[in-house]
Image (tube, helix red, strand yellow):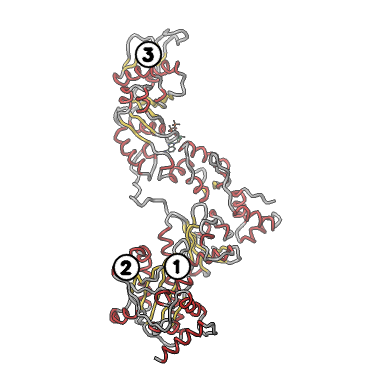
């Protein structure tokens, strides 16, 4: 009783502004309890436990976090076994949504509020570890009489905040004791262990959320770098920060001279704002190099060891990417794209038949490429003959396609001439842009298809031809049928089977396609690859092929940098602070690249490569 009176008196003295030996965060919390939460130190309140329904609601909200934190909690609980610690995971409202404690003390723990569903927010429970941790965002211990409410003064509680990957406060990890030694220093080890567990939980969370991006992990010691790093930051393909652990946020904030409490100043910023480093340098920080060599220097001079983890190959969550299904010519169409895999399976069945095939798709999606692949897979011995119906003047199409008899018209070859239809005998006739075939010729083409006969201009009798017709269009043929510019019977005859090629922006095998088009002539730097993936590609594979051909010609040392790529139509080349920073260092060194390399703690080739990539000159 006397102790309780003394505690109340002490709280009142603090409220009156008198000096106190308590830690500053305890004093500030007491003041918040009195001034903001209007709590009365003379009124003791039992621990508040939520109803089952309310608890279920809070647990549902934190489900994902609980599942990630659980393994960390269990590990910590095992480490603390036999010391009567209770572990609580509090959500951002201070409600204990997860609990690990000795069942032998169940009743006592519940009464003390060290239990599932207990609300430990400051307005509800007064100064307590979870509440003060939420209020300050810092790890701390609230030991015995540090508590505001005398009900809780037997407890000793230590808590650390858990931040989500965007730097927002997400939860609190707390370990508490029902009874403890008098000295507060007895809890220093507990504070250290809670902070270490939170660090690992946040790293696990960052890794779980970023599978397809770069992750950069840091440590002050090379020996712990790969096994137990201190901090992590995730980066998109162009090197912008997309996620971080709390320690990661602190490193970035320090480097940029801003507060870690302003995560919006960190997320979305290019890596070059924080380190003498660009996304294309990350390859030099992977495990392939010894840990001692993987040092990075932050813009504030902070020197750290770093470990870059490459993005895993992109796979969608819905279903695993299909295994390569096609063989031979059809295998060249694509690998790892669901739509292409289905198309390859269908093509393998239809290729050996004589059925006419219609291929639809936007311009440059590879319609002719598919037609050639179908021909190769057909086993037909004759040639592949392609005709672009849109490119030949209307007056010439007839003679081109069907040929003519000797002396059929003025200027005709004296011995007559075979048309393309006959040239393709035993093989495949590819009619590109079939939507542009003049109406007058459609009836004659129909006869070739329906009867397998061709009558050259001026010939008296038709000749039999064995051929397979594949046609292609980027137009809406049914609409042309409705408009009367395409004969309905021809349309049905051409489209016995149809294929639709997906546009490049929908393809899941983009990286495979770029590899094929590059054909070993060069490789892409990560930022160049990210820049290509982000484009719209209205010209599809043709546009990509052209862009890569230009880049191969421009690049040096077999590595295509972002600057080697042609700008996207309608866009100016990308720019960020990285180029400006590099210019500043070079200016400082009077254009001396070796000196700049020394100042940036990288080698000279890296500086040269960056200069080229960013279009920065030495002077
Ligand atoms: N699967 C593929 N692998 C590699 N290159 C391809 C592939 N498909 C198409 N290409 C290349 O892309 C370019 C465009 O292909 P293609 O000419 O077949 O497209 P298209 O759809 O017929 O074009 P258009 O609509 O303009 O007639 C060509 O250079 C072709 O070699």
Mark on residue 227? 1
Report which residue position mark 2 lands on. 54
143 displayed left or right of 296: left
Q: Is residue 472 visible?
A: yes
Mark on residue 456? 3
Q: Residues within 10 Å of mark 1 (few under 14, many from 20)?
A: few
Question: Residue at (37%, 44%) from the top-left corner?
Answer: 337
Marks 1/2: CA–CA distance: 40 Å
Q: Nearer the viewer, mark 2 or mark 3?
A: 2
Q: Quadrant of ligand 1?
A: top left
Question: In the displayed structure, would residue 36 be above or below residue 484?
Answer: below
Q: Residues within 10 Å of mark 2 (few under 14, many from 20)?
A: few
Q: Give coordinates of residue 143: x percent, y percent.
A: 44, 82
Question: In the displayed structure, would residue 550 be above or below residue 418?
Answer: below
Marks 2/3: CA–CA distance: 85 Å
Labels 2 and 3: the sequence-earlier one: 2
Q: Secondary structure at mark 2?
A: helix
Q: Nearer the viewer, mark 1 or mark 2?
A: 2
Labels 1 and 3: the sequence-earlier one: 1
Q: Give coordinates of residue 317: x percent, y percent.
A: 36, 52
Query: Seen from this angle, which residue lies furthest bottom?
Result: 2
Q: Secondary structure at mark 1?
A: loop
238 displayed left or right of 63: right
Q: Secondary structure at mark 3?
A: loop
Labels 1 and 2: the sequence-earlier one: 2
């Amino acid at each position: 009783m006397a102790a309780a009176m003394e505690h109340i008196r002490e709280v009142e003295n603090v409220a009156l502004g008198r000096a106190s030996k308590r830690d500053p965060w305890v004093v500030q919390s007491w003041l918040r309890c009195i001034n903001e939460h209007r709590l009365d130190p003379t009124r003791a309140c039992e621990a508040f436990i939520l109803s089952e329904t309310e608890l279920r609601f809070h647990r549902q909200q934190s489900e994902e976090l609980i599942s990630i934190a659980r393994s960390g909690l269990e590990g910590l609980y095992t480490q603390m076994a036999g010391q009567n610690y209770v572990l609580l995971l509090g959500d951002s409202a201070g409600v204990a949504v997860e609990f690990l404690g000795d069942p032998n003390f169940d009743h006592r723990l519940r009464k003390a509020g060290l239990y599932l569903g207990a609300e430990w927010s400051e307005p509800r429970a007064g100064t307590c570890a979870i509440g003060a941790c939420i209020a300050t965002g810092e790890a701390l211990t609230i030991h015995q009489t540090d508590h505001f409410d005398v009900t809780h003064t037997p407890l000793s509680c230590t808590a650390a905040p858990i931040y989500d990957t965007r730097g927002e406060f997400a939860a609190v990890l707390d370990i508490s004791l029902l009874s403890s030694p008098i000295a507060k220093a007895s809890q220093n080890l507990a504070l250290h262990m809670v902070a270490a567990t939170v660090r690992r939980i946040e790293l696990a969370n960052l890794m779980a959320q970023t599978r397809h991006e770069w992750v950069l992990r840091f440590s002050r010691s090379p020996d712990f770098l790969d096994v137990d790093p201190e901090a992590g930051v995730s980066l998109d393909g162009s090197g912008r920060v997309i996620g971080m652990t709390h320690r990661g946020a602190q490193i970035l904030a320090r480097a940029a001279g801003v507060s870690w409490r302003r995560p919006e100043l960190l997320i979305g910023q290019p890596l070059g704002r924080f380190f003498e480093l660009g996304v294309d340098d990350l390859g030099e920080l992977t495990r392939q190099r010894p840990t001692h060599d993987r040092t990075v220097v932050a813009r504030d001079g902070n020197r750290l060891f770093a470990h870059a983890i490459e993005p895993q190959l992109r796979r969608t969550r819905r279903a695993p990417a299909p295994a390569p299904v096609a063989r031979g010519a059809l295998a060249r169409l694509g690998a790892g794209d669901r739509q292409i895999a289905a198309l390859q399976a269908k093509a393998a069945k239809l290729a050996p038949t004589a059925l006419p095939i219609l291929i639809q798709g936007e311009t440059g999606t590879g319609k002719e490429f598919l037609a050639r692949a179908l021909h190769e897979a057909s086993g037909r011995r004759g040639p592949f003959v392609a005709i672009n119906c849109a490119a030949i003047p209307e007056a010439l199409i007839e003679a081109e396609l069907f040929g003519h008899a000797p002396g059929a018209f003025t200027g005709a070859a004296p011995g007559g001439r075979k048309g393309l239809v006959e040239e393709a005998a035993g093989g495949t006739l590819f009619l590109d842009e079939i939507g542009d075939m003049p109406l007058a010729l459609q009836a004659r083409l129909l006869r070739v298809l329906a009867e397998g006969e061709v009558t050259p201009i001026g010939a008296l009798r038709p000749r039999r031809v064995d051929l397979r017709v594949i046609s292609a269009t980027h137009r809406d043929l049914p609409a042309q049928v409705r408009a009367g510019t395409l004969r309905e019977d021809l349309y049905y005859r051409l489209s016995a089977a149809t294929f639709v090629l997906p546009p490049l922006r929908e393809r899941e095998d983009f990286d495979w396609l770029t590899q094929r088009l590059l054909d070993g002539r060069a490789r892409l730097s990560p930022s160049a690859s990210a820049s290509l993936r982000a484009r719209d590609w209205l010209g599809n594979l043709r546009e990509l092929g052209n862009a890569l051909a230009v880049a191969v010609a421009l690049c040096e040392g077999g590595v295509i940098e972002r600057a080697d790529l042609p700008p996207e139509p309608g866009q100016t080349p990308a720019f960020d602070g990285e180029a400006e920073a590099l210019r500043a260092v070079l200016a400082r060194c009077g254009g001396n690249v070796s000196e700049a390399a020394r100042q940036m703690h990288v080698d000279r080739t890296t500086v040269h490569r960056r200069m080229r990539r960013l279009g920065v000159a030495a002077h």
